[in-house]
Amino acid sequence: MAEVREDQVRGALATVKTPEGVVLSLASALSGIAINHGKVYLSITVDPAKARAWDAVRVEAEDAVKALPGVVSALVTLTAERKPGGAGQGQQGAGPSAAPARGAGAGGPAQRTISVPGVKSIIAVASGKGGVGKSTTSINLALGLRDQGLKVGLLDADIYGPSVPRLTGLSQKPEMGEGKTLLPLDAFGLKVMSIGFLVEEDQAMIWRGPMVMSALTQMLRDVNWGPLDVLVVDMPPGTGDAQLTMAQQVKLAGAVIVSTPQDLALIDARRGIAMFEKVNVPLLGVVENMAYFVCPHCGERSDIFGHGGARAEAEKVGVPFLGEIPLHMSIRELSDAGRPVVEAEPQSPQAEAYRRVAAGVKAALDKAEGGRAAPRIVVE
Ligand code: ADP
């Protein structure tokens, strides 16, 4: 059967009215429509104070869409968006995550409201586009931080391509702990959580901005992370709305940008840098991945992509350069086997490269931390 079209869905939504009497298909609150093999997902962004009135709209919208020929299922989620200075949090209204964020209060729209109890620093690992090795870098960076004696967690927030299940070989569903929190799994001494442990891959693939943000918020707040020194967040690739909202709303200690040496990736990486700068998240630095090729047989190094671009770019824009990771067969093979190189071959030069990056990240965090912990005292 032909795929259900968006205009058909909108047509069905034209029969439903918002609490303000606006036709839902035209309402600005309708923030996302996604259709996948007859499964229709809608998100409606609402003022949490009016969530009750909206719930009836949600049910009506579901029924109207379900009645369309070719629709297998319809799921409508209400997403509460934080109002400037208000109490709403960027997440779904129901469920355990409806608890107020720490530090929430009066302030501008860009106020960072999401922090995680028991976690000292949250850092985001981001890339301007997919496939540059962001996830591989995230887990090896997390392991490198672990090797420095830190308690480390890894949140796989890459909704569109969760890789932690593959990188760790884990696939079991996380268990519920006390207070309706999820217990993270353990991988090589890291606390890990992935959207891939929680939902079917094709389901998350089609989420739009507000749904992504709501899932990310839940994975930060509703997982029993603490106590941790550092939580490494493997971000969804790119610089879209979900990434921007995350950078804006989560209390990030800093961001690491992963780039390959190719020009295109650098243009994308620049976008990543600009995104974090825009929302005042400190850039801990840039990692150049697949910087040079190391022959698995003879160990000879070749600069097949003309390496050094990321370092030059980082210097140009005044962002620290954290180091180069070689393109090496063992990195890919071990990743695919669920044993990241820092864990599986700790004595290899590749593992050392990741540990150097981790040392740079730790130093940058310590510096930021030191800046906060030791205010300058002026004696007159
Ligand atoms: P992203 O998270 O940016 O989409 P991944 O980390 O999933 O990228 O990496 C994409 C592919 O490239 C994976 O197969 C991974 O094993 C491989 N890869 C990543 N970094 C390296 C590297 N330095 N050397 C060899 N293969 C790598």
Image (spheres, rainbow, N blue to C red):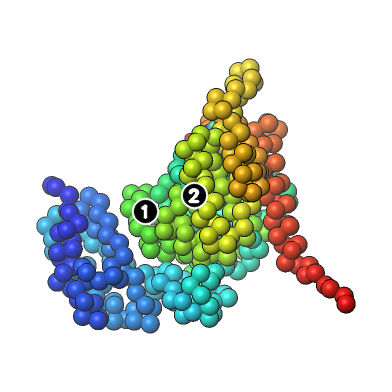
User: Which residue is at the front of the view, 236 or 367?
Assistant: 367
Whether the residue carrying mark 1 lies under 8 Å from ligand 1 is answered with no
Residue ranking furthest to the right:
380
Q: Residues within 10 Å of mark 1 (few under 14, many from 20)?
A: many
How far across and down, in percent of the image, does residue 147 sit?
A: 71, 46
- Residue 294 falls in image quadrant: top right
User: Which residue is at the front of the view, 277 or 125?
Assistant: 277
Q: Is residue 306 above or below residue 272?
A: above
How far across and down, in percent of the image, does residue 200 sit?
A: 36, 51
Task: Please state which amino acid type lies under the numbered disc 2.
Answer: Arg
- Residue 231 appearing in the image: no
Per the rendering, the mark at residue 204 is 1
Number of numbered discs visible in the structure rendering: 2
Q: Residues within 10 Å of mark 2 (few under 14, many from 20)?
A: some
Question: Which residue position holds label 2?
Answer: 271
How far across and down, in percent of the image, does residue 93 sit?
A: 39, 74
How far across and down, in percent of the image, does residue 324 sit?
A: 63, 36
Q: Residue at x 38, y 63 (%)?
A: 210
For label 2, the SS is helix
User: Which residue is at the front of the view, 347 or 207?
Assistant: 207
Q: Residue at x 53, y 78 (%)?
A: 107
User: Which residue is at the front of the view, 305 or 72?
Assistant: 305
Q: Is residue 88 left or right of residue 294?
A: left
- Residue 61 falls in image quadrant: bottom left
Q: Separation of disc 2 and disc 1 at Cα?
A: 24 Å
